[in-house]
Image (cartoon, coloured by chain):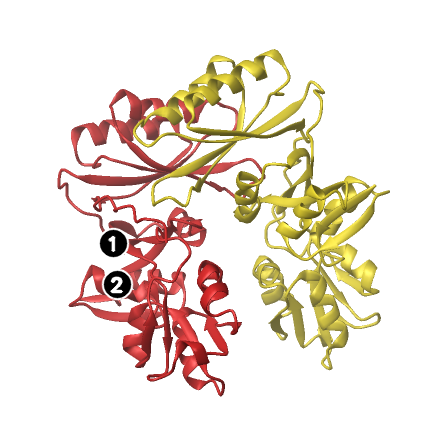
Chain colours: A red, B yellow
Amino acid sequence: MKLGYLGPAGTYSEEAAYNYEPDAELVAYSSIPAVVNAVEKREIDQCVVPIENSLHGAITDVLDFLVRTDDIMIAGELAVPIDHCLMVKPGTSITDITVVYSHPQSLGQSRIYLEGTLGHARAVASLSNAQAVIDMQESDAVAGAIGPRRAAEIYGAEVVAEAIQDNPNNYTRFVVLDDTDRPPTGHDMTSVAFQFSEDEPGLLYRALGVLRENSINMVKIESRPTGERLGRYTFLIDMELHRADPIGRETIEKLRAMSSWFKVFGSYPRMEELPIRGEA
Amino acid sequence: MKLGYLGPAGTYSEEAAYNYEPDAELVAYSSIPAVVNAVEKREIDQCVVPIENSLHGAITDVLDFLVRTDDIMIAGELAVPIDHCLMVKPGTSITDITVVYSHPQSLGQSRIYLEGTLGHARAVASLSNAQAVIDMQESDAVAGAIGPRRAAEIYGAEVVAEAIQDNPNNYTRFVVLDDTDRPPTGHDMTSVAFQFSEDEPGLLYRALGVLRENSINMVKIESRPTGERLGRYTFLIDMELHRADPIGRETIEKLRAMSSWFKVFGSYPRMEELPIRGEA
């Protein structure tokens, strides 16, 4: 089984792919379109892509891609804690570090630790958390890198501090994409997208009313621009139902009937609720 | 009157600030927090910041900032067409161009023109559309830059092609931030944000029902993560009402009563509907 992800090796995306299927052959791709096209062409069986972060919100590139593509469905979801580690060349002491490499977002998420413990070090941007480890290893200065534990394992770095991110509830949700979705398990999620014709305000309210009537829990709503003009949106909803269940079928038919454009992204087993972690 | 914007001079943000108040003294700041803080400290009277693009969606940094800040209100809105121009050193011919500079997003938005007319030129990323003009002028190669007409005027470049973006309906909506909002005009918009307590699903439907009951048009809904955990959102709604009108006051009190956290970003004159432009 070949499982694609957004590379390089040592990113949180690779960690997600590994967690989803430890026995899979993991294949790195350089962009979201590249990894999804590889599934479409059956070069790989599935891929794992990030769709939402608990601090930064939706990964809009992925949502927009799902709106546009026709041959790909969501077959699963999983969340990965974004636990930033500080890593160094083996034997280096934290107090000697003069430069810290990481992706700018990871540097921003570790501000308290950087200012408190590494106030003497200069922060330098890398292209990815994995690249940061390579930059650290190639640096002439005594350097550190911030990234996932898996990057340290892959590149032979030593982890000297763990979970250094400001907010302990930093999670990224990933979806598994395949050419088909999954059969009902009794605990499923369905992701859909729809647009309304321009001249009917209040349709979103009526659409949510369809869910309410059938006591269906809506877990998430996003709006994305259609690209036609300011103020025209595609709505994306995640709801607790399976499209093959009788109530799922009925709900989806009602939503489809009131939309000018409608698409099911897929039905798939819902992941477990995540524990809330205490403040750092 | 001093009006702040996200610099440098020659960006679409400066164009928005100029269009909003041509007689103002425009003051450039290097970040959203910096320009908003300058309003809070009364170093400047108002600022203009981007909040939404018709192709890429919400400017989430600005939304998140509005959720967090207490002393700033939305006092107006305006849209600016993102009409990318190709500009060169005066006298340069398009066919001689070997390098094209721009912000990566602008390069991506001008793909058809770049591949069709400038297939022979190499695309190089600049930090902003304004910086691209400087990079072009300092380049040893025969270079072009992609950016707003205003950048060409400021930096003395010659515009050799106009509206080269793939999608003619590329607009960015800006909001004007001030320490107070605006009195009713009869054609107003109000932006609010709210969160629900965790254990009451269906509240978003009830909230939209409050608007429906009062025949209030909702123009926009966004969800942003609260940062507490995956699946907890702040909802942001733009609706056609003024918070000082009787029906506005009633609507806002009802929404506030069903929310665990509620905030009015402000009431302000609604901008005119934008024309839809034909495909390029």
- Identity, as a three-letter code, of the amino acid under mark 1: Asp
- From the image, state whether disc 1 or disc 2 is nearer to you: 2
Observer able to see residue A42: no
- Residue B279 as seen in the image, left or right of residue A280: right
Residue A170 in the image: state x and y as whole percent.
36, 53
Q: Label 2: which residue?
A: A17
Q: Is residue A37 left or right of residue B267?
A: left
Please state, as top left, top right, bottom left or bottom right, where the N terminus of chain B lies in the image: top right
Camera-nearest residue between B8 and B79: B8
- The single residue placed furthest to the right in the displayed view is B23
Labels 1 and 2 positioned on one and the same chain: yes
Q: Residue at x 61, y 72 (%)?
A: B124
Q: In the picture provided, is A245 more to the left or to the right than B254? A: left
From what the image shows, is residue B205 above or below residue B97? above
Residue A36 in the image: state x and y as whole percent. Answer: 34, 60
Residue A246 against residue B45 in the figure, above or below: above
Determine whether A76 is above or below A87 in the image.
Answer: above
With respect to residue B273, does A34 lie above or below? below
Mark 1 touches mark 2? (CB < 8 Å): no
User: Dot 1: what SS?
Assistant: loop
**In the picture, residue B86 is in which quadrant?**
bottom right
Task: Give neighbour class at mark 2: few <14, some 14-19, many 20+ (Cα, 10 Å).
Answer: many
Considering only order in the chain, which callout, 2 or 1, is on the residue closer to the N terminus? Answer: 2
* Picture coordinates of residue A79, whole percent (x, y): 28, 53
Q: Quadrant of residue A265?
A: top left
* Disc 1: which residue: A179
Q: Residue at x 60, y 63 (%)?
A: B107
Quadrant position of residue A92? bottom left
